[in-house]
Amino acid sequence: MEEPFKKLGSDIKIAVIGGGTGSFTLLSSLKDHTSEIAALVNMADDGSSTGTLRDELGVLPPGDIRQCLVALAREPRVRELFSYRFDEGSLKGHAFGNLFLAALEKMTGDFAKGVELASDILNIVGTVEPVTLTNVHLAMENGDGEVIKGEFRIGDTDFKSVKPKMWLEPEAAANPKALAAIEQADMVIIAPGNLYSSIAPALIVPGIGEALRKTEAFCVYVSNLVTKPGQTDGYTVSDFADEIERLAGGQFLDAVLFNTEQPTDDLMNRYAKEGELRVEYDRDKLHDAPYIAAGADLLSGTPWKNLNATDPIGTHRTLIRHDSDATASALMELYSSHGANR
């Protein structure tokens, strides 16, 4: 059997599914609670630096893998190095970590081996595992029957008020280590993030949904904080949870963790102009849900800031973000109260 967890000891084994900023936020603090953590990463990214490297070098997408490696790295200076983006010359816009991972894949001839080597070099807590090693691209069909391909394009698509049909091209094969991580975990966490272009590409990999339904792990979804115009307008916490399970092919959630803290009026007014609104929650509906609904104050006290003007994706990220420490603590408390003695 595959052993996705680096150290098999007494620590709680946690698998985090997602990609990008949502996984980064959770992993950054969860690593303070356990040494047995596996980040299972979406592999459909095709924007910015990652998209260029995929097109020009034929490598698998390094961007979300890089973010998870950075989150789990022990040394702050190494984290800064891997996140550094060049702001001039032919490398403008490229993150150093993306180039490093591309070089390792070329050197070893195997993306998984490259990620493993990068993990050793960075001395990370836990492991980082691609959900698939198939060179895939995300595809969807919107409300008009139009087929749209590419994660970056889909992220900017209006879904015409329907829940889209989504798939990967070519059909993906799940990474055995990702499946083993779900099977062996004590807790599986679905990270917050863009529902259709960040979380969906991980959940729709054949075998992942089945593994989630079969695992004895305590499965938790951390709900998004704001809606996305044209895609999740009007979605409540329970709507997000329902869609997570639809994408995964069936019910598997044991709990949903959501924010109860109200952002400042000034911040929400800035969001309303862009069509993004706070994700609301209906306590009566959540009370009747088949999963545990746990609310907590999860907002970061400071808005997210894009520190690098050459990061084209960063300029579109949400200002409102989860407090990493508060969210990790709430997850551990939720597991202690409801998952540990299952």
Image (spheres, rainbow, N blue to C red):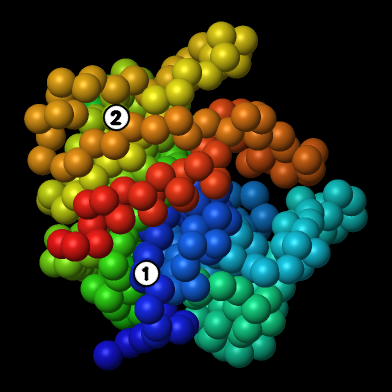
Give the number of the disc on residue 12. Answer: 1
Image quarter of the N terminus = bottom left
How far across and how far down the image is residue 107, in percent? Answer: 66, 88
Does residue 198 appear in the picture of this structure? Answer: no
44 with respect to 97 (left or right):
left
Give the number of the disc on residue 237. Answer: 2
Q: CA distance from mark 2 to mark 1?
A: 27 Å
Q: Is residue 332 above or below residue 215?
A: above
> Which residue type does callout 1 highlight?
Ile
Image quarter of the C terminus = bottom left
Q: Is residue 191 above or below residue 207?
A: above
293 with respect to 198 (left or right):
left
Instruction: Give the quarter of the image for residue 37.
Output: bottom left
> In percent of the image, x 52 and y 37: which residue is there?
322
> In percent of the image, x 21 and y 22: which residue is there?
283
How far across and how far down the image is residue 287, in percent? Answer: 15, 29
Q: Is residue 316 above or below residue 65?
A: above
Q: Nearer the viewer, residue 240 or 340?
A: 340
108 with respect to 2 (left or right):
right
Q: Nearer the viewer, residue 335 or 198?
A: 335
How far across and how far down the image is residue 268, in percent? Answer: 54, 14
Instruction: Give the crowd class for mark 1: few <14, some 14-19, many >=20 residues within 10 Å.
Output: some
Does residue 188 appear in the picture of this structure? Answer: yes
Q: Nearer the viewer, mark 2 or mark 1?
A: 1
Q: Is residue 48 above or below residue 148?
A: below
Tell me the element at label 2. helix
Q: Nearer the viewer, residue 89 or 40?
A: 40
> In percent of the image, x 30 and y 55: which residue is there?
335
- Label 2 or label 1, whichever comes before in sequence order: 1
> In percent of the image, x 53 and y 19: which residue is there?
263
How far across and how far down the image is residue 168, in percent? Answer: 33, 58
